[in-house]
Image: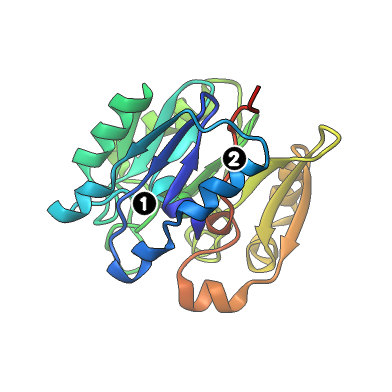
Amino acid sequence: FPNNWLSLHHDGTVVLYPLLAPSRRPERREAALVLLEARGFALRRIVDLTGFEQDGVFLEGTGSLVLDHRARVAYACRSPRTEGRPLDAFAGELGYALFVFEATGPDGGPVYHTNVVMSLGERFAVACMDAVAEDSRLALRKALEAPGRELIELDRAQMNAFAGNLLQLATRDGGRVIALSTTALASLHPAQRRALERHGELVATPVPVIERHGGGSVRCMIAEVFLPRAA
């Protein structure tokens, strides 16, 4: 799940994040950054938030944050993996406004990652609004729809099948695909599939072991590269 420890931004900023599980912290590897530079990407600034681990507060990358890069809004559902101080530090360093809300999972506790609840594409959003706290639901709906996005709503069963854990990607020829798991795809109703297909070809991959034992799905397995090319 590289997206939990790393995010790569349009201005050449690299952000390193504090992870809750000590066993996962060795996943942060300088070799990944060296590889990006070798591929011709410009790494101009590193924002290191990992020091928050010493204080026992965490922010797990684009698991915790669903980013609207154009409007510069960071959506975050609060949980033990998504806490206020590192959220504020991220927003201050990168110039994002925060939209923080509560969301509950099947056990009634907080959903551990925001990217389980929702995903943003260029012109669409996928979200399980039923999981969002009632006092935030209307404001979140308005925020997601305000830029003219199509909001595709999920029910809780679909959220638990990782249907919100998908990611729109660009193809080499400028087209769009939407990456998701076969579990997620199977949970969608025909109308929801058709709505997503308006925004890209659905590319589904079976990852049942990772979903069952790792607690994440396809979107968690992808770290987006928005870095500029080096001169």
Residue 95 image-quadrant placement: top left
- Position of residue 210 in the picture relative to residue 200 (left or right): left
Question: From what the image shows, is residue 180 above or below residue 51?
Answer: below
Q: State which mark lies toward you, 2 or 1.
A: 2
Residue 96 in sight from this viewpoint: no
Task: Give x and y (percent) for residue 125.
Answer: 57, 38
Q: Residue at x 47, y 72 (%)?
A: 214
Name which residue type carries label 2: Glu
Which quadrant of the figure contains the C terminus? top right
Name the residue nearer the viewer: 131 or 62.
62
Residue 202 in sight from this viewpoint: yes
Q: Residue at x 28, y 61 (%)?
A: 20
- Mark 2 nearby-residue class (10 Å; few <14, some 14–19, many ≥20): some
Residue 88 image-quadrant placement: top left
Question: From what the image shows, is residue 73 above or below residue 104?
Answer: above
Q: Residue furthest left?
A: 55
Task: Give x and y (percent) for residue 129.
Answer: 45, 45
Name the residue nearer the viewer: 75 or 104.
75
Q: Earlier in the sequence, mark 2 or mark 1?
A: 2
- Position of residue 109 in the picture relative to residue 203 (left or right): left
- The disc label shown at residue 37, or none: 2
Write down the residue under mark 1: 60
What secondary structure is found at the residue carrying circle 1? loop
Q: Residue at x 37, y 29 (%)?
A: 139
Name the residue nearer the viewer: 172 or 227.
227
Rendered image coloring scheme? rainbow
- Mark 1 nearby-residue class (10 Å; few <14, some 14–19, many ≥20): many
Kindly report the distance in space between the C-alpha atoms of the residues bearing marks 2 and 1.
Answer: 23 Å
Task: Give x and y (percent) for residue 130.
Answer: 42, 50
Name which residue type carries label 1: Glu
What secondary structure is found at the residue carrying circle 2? helix
